[in-house]
């Protein structure tokens, strides 16, 4: 088993012990949202940071909201979502939007699921590499959602394909990372 997989297993186990009644709605007050029009988010499941209230607020505030849809090659595409359960379908563990994909260039902000993030802004995700491939080359502000204590000072393997986040949010704060060179 590789180091990243061992860390994923450990972090999932630690996360399963957390209280999952938290909110990340405070990120909507960050300056990056002022001029944003289209926000990519995700429909959380299991122990992921809950996005239901955040997604509802994004829609209520008039943002174009896009959710990811996983393609056969495990890449992601983004589909505009109206907030209704009728416009979602279950695909494996996740709920995916039904509709036509938009251009990734339309995205102003991408809210990214993360298991842990290191102090340099690199995240450990679920292991498929879908988000790293989708984020590569985007000109969008990216913010990972994590629980308190999941911004780690511990060494975490970073591979050439890993994409640095712009910021990370816990239920209480936002930490912005310096831009990558």
Image (cartoon, rainbow, N blue to C red):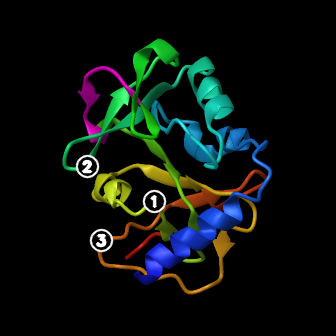
Identify the residue at image location x=30%, y=78%. Answer: 160
Tell me the residue at 33%/61% (across/down): 129
**Where does residue 141 sit, x and y in percent of width and height?**
47, 51
> Which of labels 3 and 2 is toward the front?
2
In the image, 71: left or right of 9?
A: left
Magenta segment, which residues? Answer: 96-105
Q: Is residue 25 above or below residue 80?
A: below
Q: Are marks 3 and 2 in contact (CB under 8 Å)?
A: no
Report the front residue among 101 and 139.
101
Where is 156 relative to 109, above or below? below
Q: Residue furthest left?
A: 73
Q: Kindly indicate the quadrant of the structure image that contains residue 102.
A: top left
The percent coordinates of residue 56 (x first, y second) are 62, 24
| Left or right, residue 180 beside residue 54 | left
Q: Nearer the viewer, residue 14 or 148?
A: 14
Image spot of residue 97 (x, y percent): 38, 26
* Residue 40 magenta: no
Residue at mark 2: 75
In this view of the protein, can residue 158 be seen by the observer? yes
Q: Residues within 10 Å of mark 2 (few under 14, many from 20)?
A: some
The residue under label 3 is 161
Tell me the residue that label 1 is attached to.
126
Mark 2–mark 1 distance (CA, rounded to whole Å): 13 Å
Instruction: Give the quarter of the figure containing the C terminus.
Output: bottom left
- First in sequence: mark 3 vs mark 1: 1
Q: Is residue 101 magenta?
A: yes
Q: Residue furthest bottom?
A: 155
Quarter that holds the N terminus: bottom left
């Amino acid at each position: 088993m590789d180091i990243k997989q061992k860390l994923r297993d450990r972090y999932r186990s630690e996360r399963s012990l957390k209280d999952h009644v938290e909110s990340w709605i405070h990120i909507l007050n960050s300056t990056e949202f002022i001029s944003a029009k289209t926000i990519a988010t995700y429909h959380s499941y299991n122990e992921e940071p809950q996005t239901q209230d955040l997604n509802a607020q994004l829609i209520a505030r008039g943002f174009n909201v896009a959710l990811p849809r996983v393609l056969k090659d495990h890449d992601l595409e983004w589909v505009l979502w109206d907030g209704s359960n009728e416009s979602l379908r279950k695909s494996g563990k996740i709920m995916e939007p039904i509709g036509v994909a938009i251009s990734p260039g339309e995205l102003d902000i991408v809210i990214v699921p993360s298991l842990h993030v290191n102090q340099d802004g690199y995240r450990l995700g679920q292991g498929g590499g879908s988000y790293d491939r989708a984020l590569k080359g985007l000109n969008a502000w990216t913010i990972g959602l994590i629980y308190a204590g999941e911004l780690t000072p511990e060494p975490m393997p970073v591979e050439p394909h890993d994409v640095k986040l712009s910021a990370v949010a816990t239920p209480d704060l936002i930490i912005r990372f310096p831009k990558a060179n």
